[in-house]
Amino acid sequence: MEIKIEDNFSLLFDKNNNTAYKALQMLQKECEESDKVYCYMDKLADMIDNDNSYIRTRGLTLIAYNAKWDKDNKIDANTYIISEYRHWEETHCYLLNGNTRSLLIDTGLGISNIYEEVLKLTDKPVTAVATHIHWDHIGGREIEVLHTPGHSPGHLCFWEKAGGYLFTGDLVYKDILFAYYLSTDPEAYLDSLEKVAALPVNSGF
């Protein structure tokens, strides 16, 4: 039986908590079976600012149900892009599997559990690092950590010379580059961009 998503979404705000909870359960079930609730993501995000803690919790719950990890995007046999889709940030993390260890670059927003996804892709010990000095060896793969301030003061990029891979975090991405926050520094940003532009990069992520 197909549920009426619009009706159930409205019921999330019902003053009767039992009614609202039943609507939440119906929408959770729909999230598991289809993408139909995803178009309400903006409204779910608005629920987080609601004065009512029950409504905030319902919104967060459905955001979590809609966040899905995509781990099928492989760069090569030992390098994965793990993307946290279905929310406005759409974060991308990278798992580099070496001979004896693995390196996880960034860990997502925490809406979904990346640890469970990583365990499906490696049985090796994992070191997690964040892009937002400086060498790290992960058993057969040599990764240089580059300090690239600008987007944020401590921003890091990860350079694998052997494969020509550059993992840029928020230094470079396909969209408007934000450099007007209090924590950003446009001059340092330009210096960092020039630094990574000088590298013989085959693929940037």
Image (tube, helix red, strand yellow):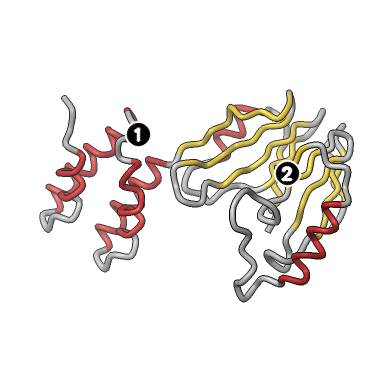
Q: Amino acid at mark 1?
A: Asp
**Does 132 sit above or below residue 104?**
below
Q: Residue at x 62, y 48 (%)?
A: 174
Q: Quadrant of the C terminus?
A: top right
Q: Residue at x 19, y 43 (%)?
A: 6
Q: Which residue is situated farthest in the bottom direction here?
A: 182
Question: Which residue is denoted by mark 2 in the rendering?
Answer: 127
Q: Quadrant of the N terminus?
A: top left
Closer to us: 35 or 103:
35
Instruction: State if disc 1 and disc 2 touch (CB < 8 Å).
Output: no
In three-dimensional space, the C-alpha distance between marks 2 and 1, rounded to whole angstroms, equals: 33 Å
Determine crowd level at label 2: few under 14, some 14-19, many 20+ residues with C-alpha closer than 10 A. Answer: some
| Left or right: 29 as drawn, with respect to 171 | left
Percent x, y of residue 185:
71, 72
At numbered mark 2, what does the secondary structure look like: helix, strand or loop?
Answer: strand
Q: How far across and how far down the image is residue 62, in percent?
A: 33, 45
- Judged from the image, the secondary structure of the residue bearing numbered disc 1 is loop
Q: Which residue is mark 1?
A: 35
Residue 159: which disc? none
The residue positioned 31% from the left and 47% from the top of the image is 40
Q: Quadrant of residue 176?
A: bottom right
Which amino acid type corresponds to the residue marked 2 in the rendered image? Answer: Thr
12 displayed left or right of 173? left
